[in-house]
Amino acid sequence: MKNIPLTQTEYATIRCEGVPEIKINNFSEIMAKITDCTVRLAGEKYNVSPKPIYLTVYKKDIQADLTLIDLPGITRNPINGQSKTIYKDIVDLIEIYIKPQTAIVLHVIPSSVDFTTSESIQLAKKNDPHCERQLIAVSKIDKFDKDIGEKLQGIGPGSMVLKLGCVAVLNRTQEEIDQNIPFDEMRRREQQFFRSKKAFENIPERYLGSGQLVKRLALIQQERIRSTLPSIIDELKKEIKSKKSELKQMPPPVTSEMDCWVLYTDLIKKYREIINARVHGVYDNEMQLKIEESIFATTDLSRTVNLTQLSNDRFDERIAFQLYNRQKECREKLHNSFTHFFSSGYQKLVLKLLEENAGVALPNFPSFSIIERLYRAEQSKFRKPCEDLIESYVEYSKAVLIKILNEVFAEETSYKDQIIHKLTDIILRAIDESEERCHNDITKMLEIEQRVFTLNHYYMDTVNKIKKKYQEYNDSVKLNGNTKVSPKFCINDFVIDVSGLSNEHQAALDAQIAMSAYCRVVEKRIVDQVSQLCYHWFITRCALVLDSKLSSAFTSAILFEWMREPFDQQQKRENLKKSIDAMERALAMGQNA
């Protein structure tokens, strides 16, 4: 209820969820409007709803502005189709409003009732055990019982000692309601009632009449505002900050094709920049910190764990790091696919081929055809590691590029799902095209590798090193009768065991050495080439140029149709602005109070 100047016309306003604010010039229509709002919120079955109805009455010459919350009366037994849980629903609703320490609980209890047994009193005492923020409006005072004067003052049986006290009020009879007796006249009749009854003649004035009740409520409201103002101001500041943060986090408003195109190109630019950074090993602070924490958390017993083991997520956004790991896996697979060339079993195979070659070449001398036959057996193993690398690139590219795309488009945007779906299709098609072209190039590369050929000095260097080491081992055995030199030694990056070799099969030994050295050359050549081809097709020709495909995928008109801000989002934005404005005005008033 709010006071207005005498020159203005009295009126009321009412609103609730789903009903915009309505101005009521005739106060007799208020009850009908309240009923309409109640039915809208709680249905026609006399149920309750936690959603409030806001009624503001603007009247002339009222004692004080007051804000009251009228809660439903407690109903124990459902009637007329009410919910079976109506009692619990009402009690839960009441407790929500009376729990805050700033709430003042005004009980309306008939004068003839024992105040201590009132259910509303019992509910309030759970949250206010010392009865410091409760008062009673004693209704139906015309039906008072004996010792009403003491009862109002908190003395005797059936009374309550409340810090805020009790005030007796005279209710309108049904006849007075039907006659629409004005409130001023009712107040006069109320005063006449208390003067005419001997039971009230010695009771202090502050306990009697609706005027005293309004005065006391206004005084309580002023004192509460004064005592809680600092905390209210702090809460207002927090709420303003929260609302501004929420407004800031909302996606930019899109009201024209130009706005739409600018926003879309900015998003695609951001997408390109993130991919470019990740490809070149530039990671954000959180990602870098996570890696460093993993390293520092490694205990003494596990310090040998390499960096690739520190991340269990093979699909995070560290593109350069993850691709390097996959290339190393390819190298490992290819390395492990080769036969153990210095095993006794392989020596027997070579000797068998030499025997079959008798009559074609000089005895005990491997012809080039034998080397080719041995190499063909190894060559068939090259494709699987290469295809595995392509598959790994495809899987990772799809996962990480779509993941980054989802991060770029804010969650709050209504258009996110639709645009993400369209852009995802474009990205997946681009990756599939790169996969096909990469497959074709790697197939050509493997066809080229069918020829046994190299100019790489690594081949002859390796052959000579193996022969030298074998000679040292063999000389040691001849001179000493036992081995002074270990039969196992490392040539460049692989280990050789020559204990099973024999000079009696020099041709087989030469073939074994040639195969081992040449396959190492091929391994290095293939690993480098397949890594370069995968990087070329999936990164250089795909990930790093995706932005151009995404930018030209749609017209501004189509984008505007998708990205135009929906009405509910516009309303949310406007409501946030209004809330911020209202709270800032309230804050200014509070600070100047």
Image: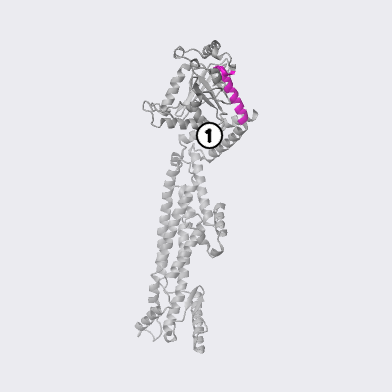
| Residue at the spot 41% in from the left edge and 49% down from the top edge | 425
> Is residue 99 visible in this depiction of the protein?
no
Near-viewer residue (399 or 297): 297
Q: Which residue is mark 1?
A: 576
> Is residue 35 visible in this depiction of the protein?
yes
Near-viewer residue (120 or 297): 120
| Residue at the spot 64% in from the left edge and 30% down from the top edge | 591
| Residue 82 placement, left or right of 217 | left
Q: Residue furthest right?
A: 592
Task: Classify mark 1: helix, strand or loop.
Answer: helix
Q: Is residue 222 magenta?
A: yes
**Part of the protein shown in magenta:** 206-228
Q: Quadrant of residue 298?
A: bottom right
Q: Quadrant of residue 419?
A: top left
Main SS of residues in magenta: helix
Near-viewer residue (400 or 290): 290
